[in-house]
Image: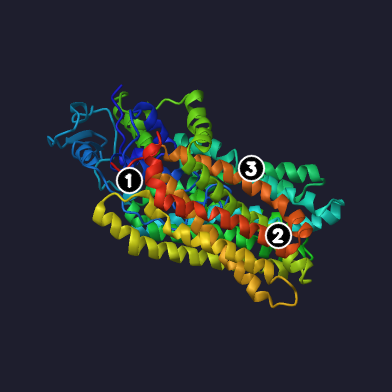
C-alpha cells in the first residue's frame, strides 16, 4: 500500500487531524511552526464547527464569528506540493500522468515519486476541487449551510414559549416543562460523535440531508404527540438528528475557503446560526399565544426545514475533497479497468478502538490533564450555557415581573442578537487590522494573540448581568435591562469564538480532540442550565440571581488574562500543546 501523505484536501477531514497522529506520532510536543498547518484543519470540523463559527449556537459547535487567519505553510509543505503527482483523465477517459519533480532538500525520497495509482485532483486549479469553485457558488453554498444550521438552532429555541402552554395543558410545573428544551440540547451531546465520522466516510451532503429528513419526521411527531412521554422522546432524538448540520457545516466551509478568504463567509454563516436561537423565542411566542397554539411551533419547524431540505437536495453539492476523490477513483476504475486506482481516503482504516480514542477518550483526558483545555472549556461552556439559561430567565424578568404577554416578553431576545452582531464586527476588525498583519509579518503567531477579543468579552460579560439584574425592576424603563442582554450576547460570542481559536492554535496536533472536549462539556452545560433558570431567578429574585451570575463571570474573567501572560510557559510544560520553537 502506498504511503499516505497529508495534503490540503485530505487534512480538511473532520477526524483526520487525530488520524494523522496515529500514523505519525510525535516524539515530542510539536512546535507551532511545524504543526500550524495541521491545526487549521481541525478548526473547521471538530464541533461543527466549530471552525469559525459558534457551534451552536447549537449546542455543538457553533462555530465563531470570524477567523481571517492566513495560513502559513512550512517549507516542508511547499516541498511536498512541488513533488506532487498529478493524475487526470481526458475527455475520452484515457489516463494521463503528469509529474513535476524538483529536488528539494529535506524531502523524503519516497515522497518524490508517488505511485501512478493514487488519484488526486488534476492540478491545483482543477475545477472539481471545491477550493477552486467560483466565489459566487461558494457564497451560495455557504448560505445553504447557514440556513440549514439555522433550522436546527431555531428548533432548539422556538419551543421555549410553548413550554408554558404545555405546562397548563398537561398539568405539570413550569420547571418540568423546560425539559422539552433541555432534552433537545442533550441530543447535541452524542450528535458530533455520530455525524463527524459519517461525514468523513460518506461526505458532508449525505451526513446533512439524511438526518435532517429524519429530524423533520420527529418534529412532526412532536407536533402530533398525545402525551408528555412522546413529546420528550421525540424532542431528544430530533436534537440528535438536528446536530448534524451544526457538526458538519463548519467543515464544509473549510472545504471551500482558504484561511485568508474564509473570514467574510464565516461572518454571514455565523449571523445565520445566531439568528436561530435568538429569533426562535420571538416567533414561538407569537405562534403560541395565537389561535394556532403551541403545536404550531413544531409545525412551523417542519415547514421551514422541509423547504430548506428540498433546496439542499437539489443545490447542495458534496464539498469534502477526499470523498470527491474517492468517487473519482471509483469512476476511473470502471472506465479504465485499472482496479488498483484509489484515493488516499480509501487507504484509511477505521476501527472501533481508534474511533473511541479519537472521539471520546483523548478529549476526556485533555479536560482532566491539560489546564488550558480545562479552563477554556469551563469558561466557554458557562458562556454558551447562559444563552440557553436565558430561555427560562427572560420570561421571568419581562413576563412575570413586568406583566408582558408571551410575545412581548420574547422580544428582548433581539438584544442578544444585536450583541452577537456587534461581536462579529469586533472580531472582523481585530482579525483584519491586528491578527492578519501579524501573520503576514511573522508567519506563525503565538496562540495568545487570539485572546484580546476574549478579554473584551470577559470584562463585558459581568457588566451585562449587573445591568440586567439591577435595572429589572418594573419601575425602571426596560431599555437598561435589554442593554444588559446586548452585553451578554456580545460577550458570549467573543468568549466562545476566541476560546475555540485559542485551543486550535495551542494544540495544533491535537486540535480536534481539544475542540471535541470543548463541545462535549458545553453541550452538557447548555442542556443543564435551563433547569437552573426558574429556581435561581424565582428563589433569589432577578437582582440577586443576576448578581450571582455576574460574580461567576468576574471569577472566570481571569482566564484569558492569565493565559495571555502565562500561556507560553504552560504550553512549554505540556506534553500535548504546541511550543513556539
Instruction: Kindly check if marks 2 and 1 are in contact, taking CB atoms under 8 A apart as contact.
Output: no
Label 2 element class: helix
CA separation, marks 1 and 3?
A: 34 Å
Total numbered labels: 3
> Residue 132 at x, y = what percent?
31, 50
Q: Nearer the viewer, residue 451 or 73?
A: 451
Circle nearer the N terminus (2, 3): 3
Q: Residue at x 50, y 23 (%)?
A: 353
> Residue 203 at x, y = what percent?
45, 39
- Tag on residue 129? 1
Q: Comparing marks 2 and 3, which lies closer to the viewer? A: 2
CA separation, marks 2 and 3?
A: 28 Å
- Tag on residue 187? 3
For mark 2, what is the residue? 545
Instruction: Kindly check if marks 1 and 3 are in contact, taking CB atoms under 8 A apart as contact.
Output: no
> Residue 494 at x, y = what percent?
49, 59
Q: Is 248 drawn above or below residue 161 in the view shown?
A: above
Quadrant in which residue 431 is drawn: bottom left
Q: Is residue 395 left or right of residue 381?
A: right
Say whether residue 295 is visible.
no
Label 1 element class: loop
Q: Is residue 344 left or right of residue 245?
A: left
Q: Comparing marks 2 and 1, which lies closer to the viewer? A: 2
Q: Residue at x 63, y 70 (%)?
A: 482
Q: Residues within 10 Å of mark 3 (few under 14, many from 20)?
A: many
Q: Residues within 10 Å of mark 2 (few under 14, many from 20)?
A: many
Q: Is the image coloured rainbow, by chain, by secondary structure, or in one colour?
A: rainbow
Label 3 element class: loop
Amino acid at each position: 500500500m502506498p504511503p499516505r501523505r497529508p495534503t490540503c484536501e485530505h487534512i480538511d477531514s473532520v477526524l483526520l487531524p487525530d488520524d494523522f497522529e496515529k500514523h505519525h506520532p510525535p516524539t515530542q510536543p510539536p512546535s507551532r511552526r511545524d504543526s500550524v498547518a495541521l491545526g487549521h484543519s481541525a478548526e473547521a470540523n471538530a464541533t461543527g464547527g466549530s471552525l469559525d463559527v459558534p457551534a451552536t449556537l447549537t449546542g455543538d459547535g457553533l462555530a465563531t464569528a470570524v477567523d481571517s487567519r492566513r495560513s502559513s505553510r512550512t517549507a516542508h509543505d511547499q516541498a511536498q506540493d512541488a513533488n506532487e503527482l498529478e493524475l487526470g483523465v481526458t475527455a475520452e477517459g484515457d489516463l494521463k500522468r503528469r509529474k513535476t519533480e524538483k529536488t528539494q532538500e529535506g524531502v523524503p525520497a519516497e515522497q518524490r515519486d508517488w505511485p501512478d495509482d493514487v488519484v488526486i485532483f488534476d492540478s491545483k486549479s482543477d475545477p472539481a476541487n471545491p477550493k477552486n469553485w467560483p466565489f459566487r457558488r461558494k457564497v451560495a453554498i455557504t448560505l445553504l449551510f447557514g440556513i440549514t444550521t439555522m433550522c436546527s438552532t431555531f428548533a432548539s429555541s422556538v419551543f421555549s414559549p410553548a413550554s408554558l402552554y404545555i405546562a397548563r395543558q398537561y398539568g405539570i410545573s413550569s420547571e418540568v416543562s423546560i425539559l422539552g428544551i433541555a432534552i433537545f440540547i442533550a441530543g447535541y451531546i452524542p450528535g458530533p460523535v455520530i455525524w463527524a465520522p459519517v461525514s468523513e466516510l460518506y461526505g458532508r451532503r449525505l451526513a446533512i440531508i439524511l438526518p435532517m429528513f429524519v429530524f423533520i419526521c420527529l418534529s412532526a411527531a412532536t407536533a402530533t404527540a398525545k402525551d408528555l412521554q412522546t413529546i420528550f422522546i421525540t424532542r431528544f432524538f430530533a436534537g440528535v438528528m438536528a446536530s448534524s448540520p451544526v457538526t458538519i457545516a463548519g467543515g464544509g466551509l473549510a472545504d471551500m475557503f482558504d484561511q485568508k478568504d474564509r473570514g467574510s463567509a464565516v461572518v454571514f454563516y455565523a449571523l445565520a446560526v445566531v439568528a436561530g436561537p435568538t429569533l426562535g423565542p420571538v416567533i414561538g411566542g407569537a405562534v403560541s399565544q395565537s389561535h394556532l397554539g403551541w403545536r404550531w411551533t413544531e409545525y412551523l419547524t417542519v415547514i421551514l426545514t422541509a423547504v430548506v431540505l428540498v433546496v439542499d437536495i437539489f443545490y447542495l453539492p458534496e464539498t469534502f475533497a477526499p470523498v470527491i476523490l474517492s468517487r473519482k477513483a471509483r469512476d476511473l476504475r470502471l472506465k479504465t479497468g485499472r482496479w488498483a486506482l484509489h484515493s488516499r481516503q480509501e487507504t484509511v482504516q477505521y476501527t472501533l478502538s481508534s474511533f473511541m480514542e479519537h472521539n471520546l477518550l483523548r478529549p476526556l483526558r485533555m479536560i482532566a490533564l491539560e489546564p488550558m483545555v480545562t479552563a477554556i472549556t469551563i469558561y466557554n461552556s458557562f458562556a454558551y450555557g447562559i444563552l440557553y439559561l436565558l430561555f427560562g430567565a427572560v420570561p421571568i424578568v419581562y413576563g412575570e415581573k413586568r406583566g408582558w404577554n408571551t410575545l412581548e416578553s420574547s422580544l428582548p431576545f433581539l438584544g442578544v442578537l444585536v450583541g452577537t452582531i456587534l461581536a462579529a464586527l469586533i472580531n472582523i476588525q481585530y482579525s483584519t487590522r491586528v491578527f492578519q498583519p501579524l501573520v503576514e509579518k511573522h508567519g506563525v503567531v503565538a496562540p495568545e494573540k487570539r485572546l484580546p477579543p476574549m478579554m473584551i468579552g470577559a470584562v463585558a460579560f459581568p457588566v451585562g448581568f449587573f445591568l440586567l439584574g439591577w435595572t429589572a425592576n418594573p419601575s425602571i424603563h426596560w431599555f437598561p435591562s435589554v442593554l444588559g442582554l446586548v452585553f451578554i450576547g456580545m460577550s458570549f460570542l467573543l468568549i466562545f469564538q476566541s476560546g475555540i481559536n485559542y485551543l486550535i492554535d495551542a494544540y495544533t496536533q491535537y486540535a480536534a480532540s481539544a475542540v471535541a472536549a470543548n463541545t462535549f462539556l458545553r453541550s452538557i452545560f447548555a442542556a443543564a442550565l435551563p433547569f437552573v433558570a426558574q429556581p435561581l431567578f424565582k428563589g433569589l429574585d432577578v437582582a440577586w440571581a443576576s448578581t450571582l451570575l455576574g460574580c461567576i463571570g468576574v471569577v472566570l474573567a481571569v482566564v484569558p488574562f492569565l493565559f495571555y501572560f502565562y500561556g507560553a510557559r504552560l504550553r512549554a510544560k505540556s506534553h500535548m500543546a504546541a511550543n513556539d520553537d
